[in-house]
Every structure is written in C-alpha cells, then in structure tokens.
Image (tube, grey):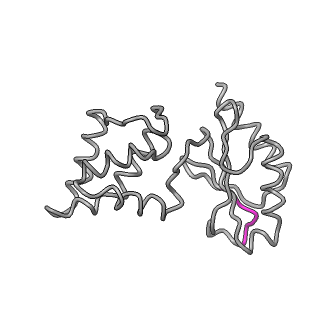
Amino acid sequence: MLSVKHNEPVEFTEETLSKFAEIVARYPEGKQKSALLPVLHEVQATYGWLSAPAMDSVAAYLNIEPIEVYEVATFYTMFFLQPQGKYALEVCRTGPCCLVGAERIMKHIEKRLGVKEGEVTPDGLFSWRGVECLAACGYGPVLQIGPEYTFYENLTEESVDKLIEELTEKAKS
C-alpha cells in the first residue's frame, strides 16, 4: 500500500491509470462519472484512504468537479477520509447490536488499543470506528475488519482480545 499525507499531491501510477481505464471502459461514452465508485475503491485500495488531493486527481481524471467526488466519498461509510490502521475494526453501533453489548465492545476496543475512535495505534496496525448496520442483527455484537471486510460475530471482550492478538501476530509474520 502506498503512503500519502493529507495535503500531498497525488499522481497515479501507470498501473493505477490502466485500472482506471478498464473501469471507465465499462460505461457508455460520456458517462465516465458512472465509474466514480469503483475508481474510488481502487484509490482506497492503493493508498488506504481518500485524501483531498487524491479525490481532486480522481475528479480531474474523470473530468468532473471535485465536489462531485467529495459528495460521494463523504456519503458512503466504506470510504475512509482519514488514514487508517492496517486493520480497520468497524463495530456495528445500531440498536440491535447495542442491545447485546456493542457499546461495551467499543469501549473495550478503545481501552485495549489505547486509541479513541478514528485514531490509529502508534504501530500503524489498528484503527476502529462505530458504523451503521452490518446486516448481522441476529449475531451481534458484530464487527468487520477492512480492507477485506471479514465479519466477526457474537463478540465478547475475550474474543476481541484474541482477534487483536491474532492480527498482531499475523502482521509480524
């Protein structure tokens, strides 16, 4: 994954531009804005998040206004507008999950990782946030881990600790 800072200009690699071209080719001539979502996914997969300069570069590539990119990126929670940890823990915070302990799990993650919601651990491995429904209401509390979006259900403090330990070990190997 490439690294990019908040205000650092972004110039896409030839490989990334080639992927963009493949994506845009799926849509009718003059309708390149239709490629915005998959292009943003590609940028996020490359850089880990969507900086304003990266979104500006996407707008220029697609020949649309930057605000059109910002509107989409800020609407969908799947896009990260801040740098994330290698493992982005996303805990469902809607009613059904909260009824079975999601708020307790979020407090535990904050304490265990030593960072508040939206922050990244000093080693760069973890970040976490509460998100809207993950469509697993019968299995709450539930979290997903990006960027692969693996789901973990029926969470307890112990299962969260085990998960964090496993991911930490995985990152070391």
Classify residue 97 as left or right of residue 54: right
Residue at the spot 82% in from the left edge and 54% down from the top edge? 107
Residue at the location (77% across, 61% down)?
154
Q: Which residue is drawn at 60% across and 52% down?
A: 150
Q: Which residue is drawn at 20% across and 64% down?
A: 31
As for residue 141 lying within the magenta part, the answer is yes
User: What is the magenta range?
Assistant: 138-143
Q: In this view, does 15 lie above or below 40?
A: above
Residue 24 at what x, y percent from top left?
A: 23, 54
Q: Can you give x and y, in whole percent of width and height, for residue 8 in the image?
A: 42, 34
Which of 167/88 is in front? 88
Q: Which residue lies furthest to the front in this view?
A: 7
Q: Magenta stretch: residue 41 in it?
A: no
Residue found at the very far left of the displayed protein: 29
Please say if 37 is above or below 113. Answer: below
56 on left or right of 162: left
| Location of residue 59 in the rendering, given as x and y in whole percent from the top left corner | 30, 52
Residue 17 is situated, as x and y percent measured from the top left of the image, at 26, 40
**Quadrant (top left, top right, bottom left, bottom right) of the C terminus:** top right
The picture quadrant where one finds residue 106 is bottom right
Along the line of sight, the residue nearer the viewer: 131 or 145: 131
Quadrant for residue 161, please give it. Answer: top right
